[in-house]
Image (cartoon, helix red, strand yellow):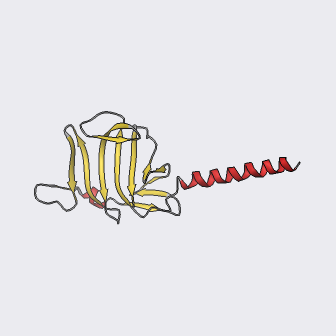
Amino acid sequence: MKSIKFLKISKLFLFVIFLSCSKENHSLKGVSYITNKKIILSATSAEMYNFADNSYALEKDIYFDKNGCIIKFGRSLGEGLLYFYKHPKESQLRLDNDKILFRIKIDRIRNIIIENKDTIKDFVIKENKIITPKDKNGRIFIYTFK
């Protein structure tokens, strides 16, 4: 009788440990702010990004300041990425107004990422990166954070 009770307690204990470990894998509690967002596709292009032992086409490469504002935005073209800057230097391209007004925020209480009016709820955290599953268009979002 004692061994059955011990077995039930052991299973419950292991289940609680499993839940706490898996929850940490999806928690934004340790994230201060997003520094970079990469949007990758399972296609080929001139600019490739290695992720999870595979190469993916890099569609967009976006850098943020600690306030969640875009400071550098890279868009894929046939020859590679074309970058636009918030504060361009000589011979650099300026960001569009919609990119300048864009904001990305972390809501640690609701455990979501907010991009302007969009919310990202489905993600995992691996190796200092927040990774979303493929969307309906085959895109994966990879966020780097501090």
**Drawn side of residue 20 relative to residue 104, left or right:** right
The residue positioned 39% from the left and 52% from the top of the image is 143
Asked if 109 appears above or below 3 in the picture, the reply is below
The residue positioned 35% from the left and 45% from the top of the image is 39
In this rendered view, identify the residue nearer to me: 124 or 113: 124
**Drawn side of residue 73 relative to residue 33, left or right:** left
Where is residue 146 drawn, in percent x and y? 39, 61
Where is residue 6 drawn, in percent x and y? 80, 51
The furthest residue to the front = 3
Where is residue 94 drawn, in percent x and y? 18, 57
The furthest residue to the right = 1
Asked if 143 appears above or below 57 in the picture, the reply is below
**Drawn side of residue 122 relative to residue 99, left or right:** right
Quarter-of-image position of residue 105? bottom left
The furthest residue to the bottom = 67
The furthest residue to the top = 43
Where is residue 74 drawn, in percent x and y? 25, 49
The image shows a total of numbered marks equal to 0
The residue positioned 79% from the left and 47% from the top of the image is 7
The residue positioned 53% from the left and 60% from the top of the image is 110
